[in-house]
Image (spheres, grey):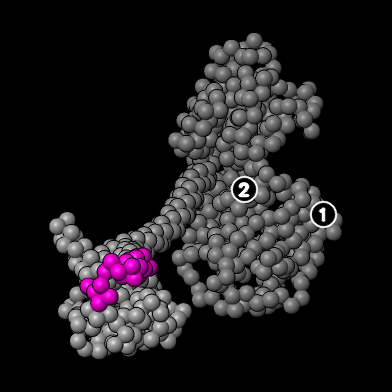
Amino acid sequence: MNGEPLTILLVEDNPDHAELVMRNMEDFQVANSIIHVEDGEAALDCLYGRGKYADRKLFPMPHLMLLDLRLPKVDGLEVLKEVKGDADLKALPVVILTTSDAERDSAMAYEYHANSYVTKPVSFDEFSTLLRDLGFYWLAWNKRPW
Amino acid sequence: MNLENLKIFAVKARRAVNMAALPVVAMVVVAVTLNYAISAFFLSDAEEKIKNILLSHRGLHQYIQKVMHPAFYKAREQGEISQDFYAPEIFSSSFVVRVDHGFYNEELKKAGLPEIYYKLASNNPRNPVNKADEFESSLIKMFNENSEISEFKKVVNIDGKKYLYFAIPFLETSNACIRCHGKREDAPQGLQALYPGQGGFNEKAGVYRAIESIRVPVSDEISTAFILTCSLSVGIIAMFMLFFFNRRLKRTVDKKTYSLEAEVVERKKKEDDLEKKNAELERFAYTVSHDLKSPIITIKGFTGALEKDLLKGNYERMAGDLKRVSDAADRMNDLLCDLLEISTVGRVVNTSEAVDMNLLVEDVLAQLEGPLRNSDIKVTVQSDLPPLFCDRQRMCEVVQNLVENAINYMGDQVDPHILFGVREESGVKVYFVQDNGIGIDEKYHENVFGLFNKLDAKSSGTGIGLALVKRIIEVHGGRVWVESDGVGKGSRFCFTVGRNF
């Protein structure tokens, strides 16, 4: 790690799942900070720095977005569509992290240019390994857009 | 065939006869008119021919009487001819014309044409061949009594053959005629010698002494007219029938087309319904798999974390993690109960009845008294709600879920208020639950009724309430929707129940 502050935006409506993700991320110390929002509207507000997310010091532009699909208000696919359709945001790596392994969901996610699509593993060990690998790959190995 | 079928058959037959009667009568009238017109056309043609011949004969009579007689008398006065000389071959116009017609007939025969029957008929003829029969006598009488009538025509039947009979009066008897047709003793000696009886004498001037008649066969013309009429009639009948059958065929085809179109529309509707149902089912399966998997991940995840912490001897967060596991299991149980609940709607049907909505709403509000009091919500119920024909128990669930929904999404309204009422929209009663809570953005108006869909992750409940309401209302053949001017403006959930309920 080169000491740069790295931020993950976690969009997850299930507080338990969010807790599991954050605990694992903290354990592996891949990111300096995790911003957790519970719905698609908040995710977009955070990305655009709108409303209560206007302060970029508190809510910096994330380097990775972990996005659930089934979300209250604005659906995960809608968020993805918006991000990938925005000139300033489209470079942001978006990893779909969801319970759904439905064919339709992954197809739609790739249709909207998701960078990756992973299904939450039921096993705790696999869940941990996945998050570790995911964090290292996208934040360390992968050349970040910013 | 039983009696009932026989009756139906009789009615149908009578109707067919009634339907056929008018065209048949019309056809007969047309045929008769046609036949008359065509016959008249042919007969007038024959008539003209006959009249020509008779007029030509009259011309010859005139010539003899007006040219030959004066010349003859002059020669006699001058003594060139004896006073007593008489010869019918020279003097009698009826003789000359009769013989002339005889020659004419011979010529016709030579030319291969049919002979034409000619007769000069008189009541008082010199020559018995000119004697009028009863019919001809009556014609002579008729012409004498009706001076305005100049001709007589009739189609007569002789020995089974049809003839056109045509007669005109012979020249009026003049003073010149009386020389030979007056008293016998005044006539020339030669004439007296030639005709011994009183025949042809004692005539008076100024009357019609005879008629001239011709008859020609018209069987050919009449049968031609008949054949023409028949063919024309057949043609017209054929056209009429073609028109009739074409119209019937068109009507049948139209009817069939309409029914086919209706069938296509209905089938399309069924297909759409099925498609909708399929999509709904797919959504349902998706939702169920997603929402049931969620707590499993939580349970597995936190038991894993607990195991790890236990090994490390890290006990701080174990109580919290255990609660998460327990809550997730409870949540799963709730979801399964809800699923069971929604699956029974439409499957388990209670008998519908006329439900007093005033009582029903009162009951539901009594059940929700606790939560309503806790949130300090004021409830108004419109008085005299009309009764609703529905499944009472299910309707209770509908009202309960809508009121609970209003309670859950009241937000931090300082003066929370719920109104239960009814309004009429194009003859349909629309019941509604209105609140002044957080309201719903228009883009979520459809979404809120989705299974396990929640607009606020933190709100209580599994998100089945409105999905259940929608399912129950759909089973009742009605419609449910939400009206809201937007966030912070409150919501009004409306529903109707189908007519047959």
Is B66 inside the magenta-drawn segment?
yes
Judge whether residue A69 can be spotted in this image. yes
Q: Which residue: 69% across, 17% down?
A: A5
Q: Which residue: 66% across, 46% down?
A: B444
Side of A61 where B116 appears, left or right: left
Residue B248: quadrant of the picture: bottom left
Q: Residue furthest top?
A: A2
Side of B438 where B194 appears, left or right: left
Q: Which numbered tag is attached to residue B447?
A: 2
Tell me which amino acid carries mark 2.
Asn
Judge whether residue B404 can be spotted in this image. no
Q: Residues within 10 Å of mark 2 (few under 14, many from 20)?
A: some
Q: Residue furthest front?
A: B79
Q: Which residue: 59% across, 21% down?
A: A93
Pinpoint residue B227: horizontal percent, then vertical percent.
25, 65
Q: Which numbered tag is attached to residue B481?
A: none
Q: Residues within 10 Å of mark 1 (few under 14, many from 20)?
A: some
Q: Chain of mark 1?
A: B
Q: Earlier in the sequence, mark 2 or mark 1?
A: 1
Q: Nearer the viewer, mark 2 or mark 1?
A: 2
Front residue (pair B166, B347): B166
**Image: B198 above or below B166:** below
Tell me which amino acid carries mark 1.
Gln
Q: How many angstroms separate mark 2 from mark 1 (CA)?
A: 24 Å
Q: Chain of mark 2?
A: B
Pinpoint residue B102: horizontal percent, then vertical percent.
19, 67
Disc 1: which residue: B413
